[in-house]
Structures are given as C-alpha cells and as structure tokens.
Image: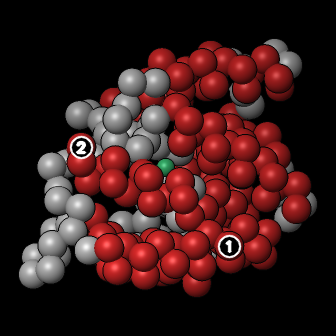
C-alpha cells in the first residue's frame, strides 16, 4: 500500500475517534500536531512519515480520553498492521508515541519521539493553547480563575503552558514557540487587568 494511502487511512481512523471531542483533543488538534510534526521533521532531517503518522495517533490510549486505554492501543496496532505498515515502522511509531504525555514527564528516546512531543506541546501554547485550556477546563467543570483555589484554568498556565518553551527538544520547535510564549504573557497581563 502506498504511503499516501496509508496516511489517508490513518487520518480517517483518527477522525472516527476524535471528531466529536469537546475537551480540546479533537480531530483538529490531531491535524495541527500532524502538520507541525511533519514540518519539524523536515527541518530536523528526520523521518516525515513516522513523525506524521505518530503525531496523528499520539492521543490514542490517553487515559484522560479513553475508558479502556490498553484496548484502544491494541486496536491501533492491529489497524496499522492491516495497512501493511512494516513491523520496523510500527515499532518506530510506537517509540515516537509512548512518551508524548506532558504529565508523565518522560523524555522520548528517539528523534521522532522528540519531534512528536514538541509538536504536541506547540499546540498547547499560544492562542490555540489558550483556547484549548479553557475548553478543557470547561469540560472538566473547572472555573476560569479563582484567587484562592488552584483548581482553575489560569493555574494551568503556570503548571504547564509557560514551562513549555524551555522543555522543547528541537530548534525548529523553539522558534515556533517564541511568539506563542510572549503572546501568552501578554494575554495574562490583560486578563489580570480585566479581572
Ligand atoms: Ni495531544
């Protein structure tokens, strides 16, 4: 099967699982991460097919999003085999996905993994990151902000978003992050003024 057809089928597989998500992990998130990963892969001379495929699939089996994560991951590997993707490539995709999570704090062991993690983190910052933070907070019933209680969406900027620029692995991602980081700082200034 041709690589373009394989990628098209991966895209459709992801669409079926994420098109109705309202927590900021929807199909458009997967699409942006896939495009960013492909871009970073070209800048860093990495494997664009592995990076893009892994980026499309990176949130499959996330325990925040799947009731039965292990089953979702098993299904995904059977699906990749059904596309006649080589065993070696499936291993590379798996290695590129397994350490993507921010909360687990793992550093991916392969360049492809670092690229996918960077691409996912780029989508967590800037204007899109801000929108996704409030969408996620709303879906989980959290307030926008609270002065005495840390369980709010503004706190998430300090717990995660503002730390991201210093945790990126590739220089291509660090360049993408600059603007987005300073935009979030301006946003917070304005937020507190209005609050
Ligand atoms: Ni993600």
Residue 53 versus residue 73: which sits nearer the camera?
53
Q: Position of residue 61 (x, y in %)?
A: 39, 40
Tell me the residue that label 1 is attached to.
Answer: 179
Answer yes or no: disc 1 within 8 Å of ligand 1: no
The residue sitting at 58% across, 84% down in the picture is 166
The residue sitting at 23% across, 34% down in the picture is 67
Q: Is any atom of residue 117 visible in this view?
A: no
Quarter of the image that includes the C terminus: bottom left
Residue 55, image quadrant: top right
Which callout, 2 or 1, points at the residue further toward the start of the chain? 2
127 left or right, relative to 116: left
The residue sitting at 79% across, 69% down in the picture is 172
82 left or right, relative to 6: left
Residue 118 vs 3, above or below: the answer is below
The residue sitting at 66% across, 18% down in the picture is 9
Q: Position of residue 43 (x, y in %)?
A: 88, 62
Q: Which mark is residue 139?
A: 2
4 left or right, relative to 100: right
Q: Position of residue 192 (x, y in %)?
A: 32, 79
- Element type at mark 2: helix
Alpha carbon separation for disc pair 2 and 1 = 27 Å
Q: Position of residue 56 (x, y in %)?
A: 61, 38
- Element type at mark 1: helix
Residue found farthest to the front:
194
Residue 150, image quadrant: bottom left
């Amino acid at each position: 099967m041709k690589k373009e057809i394989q990628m098209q089928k991966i895209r459709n597989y992801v669409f079926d699982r994420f098109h109705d998500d309202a927590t900021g992990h929807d199909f458009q998130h997967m699409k942006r991460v896939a495009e960013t990963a492909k871009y970073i892969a070209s800048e860093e001379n990495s494997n664009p097919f592995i990076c893009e495929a892994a980026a499309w699939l990176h949130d499959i089996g996330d325990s925040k999003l799947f009731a039965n994560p292990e089953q979702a991951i098993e299904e995904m590997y059977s699906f990749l085999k059904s596309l006649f993707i080589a065993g070696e490539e499936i291993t590379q995709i798996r290695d590129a996905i397994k350490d993507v999570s921010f909360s687990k704090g793992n550093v991916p062991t392969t360049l492809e993994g670092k690229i996918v993690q960077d691409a996912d983190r780029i989508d967590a910052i800037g204007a899109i990151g801000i929108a996704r933070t409030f969408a996620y907070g709303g879906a989980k019933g959290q307030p926008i902000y609270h002065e005495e209680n840390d369980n709010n969406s503004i706190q998430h900027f300090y717990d995660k978003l503002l730390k991201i620029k210093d945790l990126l692995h590739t220089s291509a991602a660090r360049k993408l992050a600059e603007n987005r980081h300073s935009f979030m700082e301006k946003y917070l200034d304005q937020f507190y003024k209005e609050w």
